[in-house]
Image: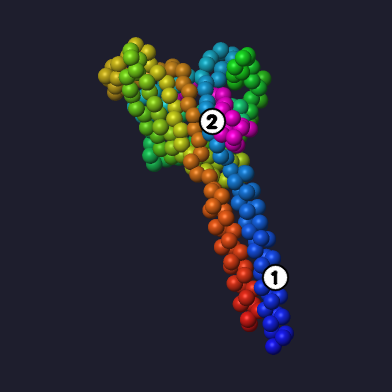
Amino acid sequence: MFNFKSQVLNATLAATVAIPVAAASLFTSASSAQAAALTGEFDFDGGTTINPSSSSLVTLTSNGLTFTPQPLTPVSISTSSPTLGGSFTAFNSASIKNFSFSNNTEQLLLDFGNLSLFGSPSPGVIVNPLTDTSSITDGKDTFTLTSSKYKLSQDGANVNIGVELWGFFTSATGEKTKGAGNLTFQKNNTTVEQATEILKNGSLANLAFSGGAFTTTVPEPTTMLGLGLVGAGMLVSRRRKAQAS
């Protein structure tokens, strides 16, 4: 009897010690995955390409957006603070891709990286023939669209164009996080009625643009705690079954 009680006590103590170990293991795994995933928010604006000299511009049709210059349209990436910026503080630039207004296809929109910045007091992204653009064309750390749509609204004598962006971010290590954002630009001295008529067969062309995006899913601490306790409980149950048998 004494030996049996001793075995039960030892098993209970071992399981108790194992609880923080199991939880710590789960927290470590979750923390590593969260660190590898892209999380946070950022703003973006058009960059500049030299030879020929050109600013990044957008053209709207009823079917989608096209950007110039081609084949590479650079944009600058900025964050309001390290806390809010999260993963995106690691980037200062990206390339932006043409896309159509479709709810059925995935389309790469942004490829994040780092380029040399020039200018003061507000540095900007400048691409010249000697610029190494491999970081913004490597297909790593990206934002992919799953759906988008545009809306016209009157603002005085101008038309504002707002484009909804929905999709997901993919980190260089393959982790995905849901994301959303918007892209905005303006057509001066135009009414919504005039813009709508133009877009039936034509385009609103060569407009300066800006935008922003953010991740919409991040593992919550309470969820991680729950996973840790569940894992620890499973470990205790298995040890008890082993001792009983």
Image location (x, y in percent) of residue 29 = 63, 53
Q: Nearer the viewer, residue 160 or 74?
A: 160
Q: Residue at x 29, y 22 (%)?
A: 196
Image location (x, y in percent) of residue 102 = 38, 36
Residues rendered magenta in the picture:
66-90
On the picture, is 17 further left or further right than 160? right
Image location (x, y in percent) of residue 108 = 50, 35
Number of the front mark, 2 or 1 = 1
Name the residue at the bottom extreme: 1
Residue 196 drawn above or below residue 188: below
Q: Quadrant of the N terminus?
A: bottom right
Q: Which residue is mark 1?
A: 14
Q: Residue at x 34, y 17 (%)?
A: 155
For the question of whether residue 55 can be seen, the reply is yes
Looking at the image, tell me whether mark 2 or mark 1 is earlier in sequence order: 1
Q: Is residue 201 magenta?
A: no
Q: Mark 1 belongs to which amino acid?
A: Ala
Q: Is residue 79 magenta?
A: yes
Q: Which residue is mark 2?
A: 42
Q: Nearer the viewer, residue 207 or 137?
A: 207
User: Splitting the image into 4 quarters, where does residue 91 fall?
Assistant: top right
| Mark 2 closeness class: few <14, some 14–19, many ≥20 residues within 10 Å | many
Q: Mark 2 belongs to which amino acid?
A: Phe
Q: Residue at x 55, y 57 (%)?
A: 226
User: Splitting the image into 4 quarters, where does residue 176 fall?
Assistant: top right
Question: Could you tell me which secondary element the residue under label 2 belongs to?
Answer: strand
Residue 242 drawn above or below residue 144: below
Image location (x, y in percent) of residue 92 = 61, 27
User: Splitting the image into 4 quarters, where does residue 199 fall?
Assistant: top left
Q: Nearer the viewer, residue 89 or 7?
A: 7
- In 3D space, how far apart are the residues under numbered discs 2 and 1 (Cα atoms)? 47 Å
